[in-house]
Image: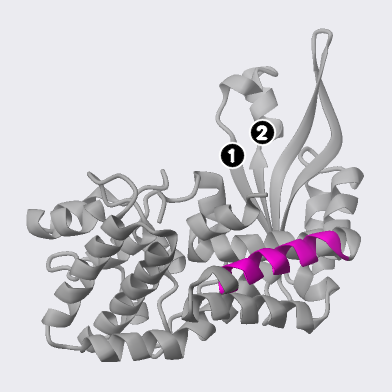
């Protein structure tokens, strides 16, 4: 597993609705680990200071930077160590459950990653994960067989929830016709945007990453020297969201509002049949239950089928499919994208 996603992408993850908190389900590592992240997108130092050197040295070399705890799995493992348990957020304790539930969830997460590493041929990393899994089972709360059964019974639910989340999201470049002048220069305002639909209540959330009107005012047009911002706008419906954008005339214009309306119509959960979602869930689950050349090949086939069919709708589905794979394992997603 690679390091945490860049800050802008990571914020899109933590701004998504909290989920996956049931005691009998697998742990969504990105949602869970986000509870321990500071505003710079890194593990809050108070959690790393609360654990022992022994625990730190066992967890840190798993992946990412071997000298820091910097991946969702490593953060999740740290969260259940002595010292950190006493100060972790209440929501984290609810999500991870009692000691037996915690060991089942963490053991299954380690086992999941270990299966992928073996498929990728990284025997050294797989061995490190094997050692951590043995440490978990040696605590006596769960057996290796129980961990593997929990994984096989729960992986489809985790994948289903991950696909559902990504199929209710679309990312795009939000262009506007807002232009500021600085001498003879004309500077346009565009944003990297993510539009998220809440399938339960129909609420829409727009996350925009870029320079806003106040940046131009404050810096007199020298925006490249000022920090980018991420702003969030919500609405109880798509129309309510668009109305709120219309009130913010210094940041959005009719071009931007129309672009969001168009993109909302491409959100896969809205624009495509349920069969696309089910196909994504089935092919990803098949790989995670039995990682081999055949099941991996089917991931690529499904991605290319989504990408090449149904124009913009198909491309949106393909993007959601890749984001779901990335959430589960960045290395697998990267390989699927390779020609």
Can residue 197 be seen here? The reply is: no
* Residue 112 x, y percent position in the rendering: 39, 73
**Residue 300 sits inside the magenta stretch:** yes
Residue under label 1, please give it. Answer: 229
Residue 269, magenta (yes or no): no
Quarter of the rendering containing residue 199: bottom right
- Mark 2 or 1 closer to N-term? 2
Give the number of callouts.
2
Q: Which mark is residue 105?
A: none
Residue 153's place in the image compared with 326, above or below, is below
Query: Helix or strand or loop: what does disc 2 sit on?
Result: loop
* Span shown in magenta: 295-309
* Residue located 41% across and 60% down the image: 34
Outermost residue, top direction?
183
Q: Nearer the viewer, residue 237 or 167?
A: 167
Residue 21 coordinates in the image, percent (x, y): 43, 81
Task: Say if 132 sits above or below 19 in the image.
Answer: above
**Front position in the image: 258 or 239:** 258
User: Vertically, is 74 above or below 106?
Assistant: above
Q: What main secondary structure does the magenta stretch of the protein show?
A: helix
Task: Identify which residue is drawn at 34% across, 48% down.
Answer: 64
Image coordinates for residue 172, horizontal then vertical, percent: 75, 49
The x, y position of residue 120, in whole percent, is: 43, 60
Q: What residue is disc 2 on?
A: 211
In front here: 189 or 141?
141
Q: Is residue 294 left or right of residue 34?
A: right
Instruction: Report if the CB atoms under discs 2 and 1 are less than 8 Å apart.
Output: yes
At horizontal 62% and vertical 67% (from top left) the residue drawn is 297
């Amino acid at each position: 597993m690679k390091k945490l996603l860049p800050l802008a992408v990571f914020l899109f993850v933590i701004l998504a609705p909290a989920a996956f908190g049931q005691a009998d389900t697998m742990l969504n590592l990105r949602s869970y680990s986000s509870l321990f992240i500071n505003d710079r997108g890194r593990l809050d130092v108070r959690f790393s200071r609360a654990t022992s050197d022994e625990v730190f040295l066992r967890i840190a070399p798993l992946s990412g930077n071997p000298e820091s705890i910097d991946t969702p799995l490593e953060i999740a493992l740290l969260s259940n160590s002595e010292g950190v348990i006493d100060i972790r957020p209440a929501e984290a304790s609810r999500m991870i459950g009692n000691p037996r539930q915690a060991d089942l969830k963490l053991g299954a997460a380690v086992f999941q990653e270990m299966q992928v590493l073996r498929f990728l041929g990284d025997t050294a990393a797989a061995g490190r994960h094997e050692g951590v899994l043995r440490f978990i089972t040696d605590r006596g709360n769960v057996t290796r067989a129980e961990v593997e059964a929990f994984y096989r019974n729960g992986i489809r639910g985790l994948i289903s929830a991950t696909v559902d989340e990504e199929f209710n999201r679309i990312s795009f470049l939000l262009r506007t016709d807002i232009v500021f002048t600085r001498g003879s220069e004309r500077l346009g305002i565009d944003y990297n945007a993510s539009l998220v639909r809440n399938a339960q209540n129909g609420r829409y959330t727009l996350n925009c990453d870029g320079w806003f009107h106040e940046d131009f005012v404050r810096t007199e047009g020298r925006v490249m020297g000022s920090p980018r911002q991420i702003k969030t706008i919500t609405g109880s419906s798509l129309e309510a969201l668009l109305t709120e954008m219309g009130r913010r005339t210094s940041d959005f214009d009719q071009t931007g509002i129309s672009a969001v309306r168009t993109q909302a119509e491409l959100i896969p959960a809205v624009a495509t049949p349920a069969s696309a979602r089910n196909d994504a869930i089935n092919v990803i689950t098949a790989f995670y239950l039995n990682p081999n050349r055949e099941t991996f090949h089917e991931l690529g086939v499904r991605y290319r089928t989504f990408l090449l069919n149904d124009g913009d709708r198909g491309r949106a589905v393909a993007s959601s499919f890749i984001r779901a794979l990335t959430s589960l394992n960045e290395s697998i997603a990267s390989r699927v994208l390779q020609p």
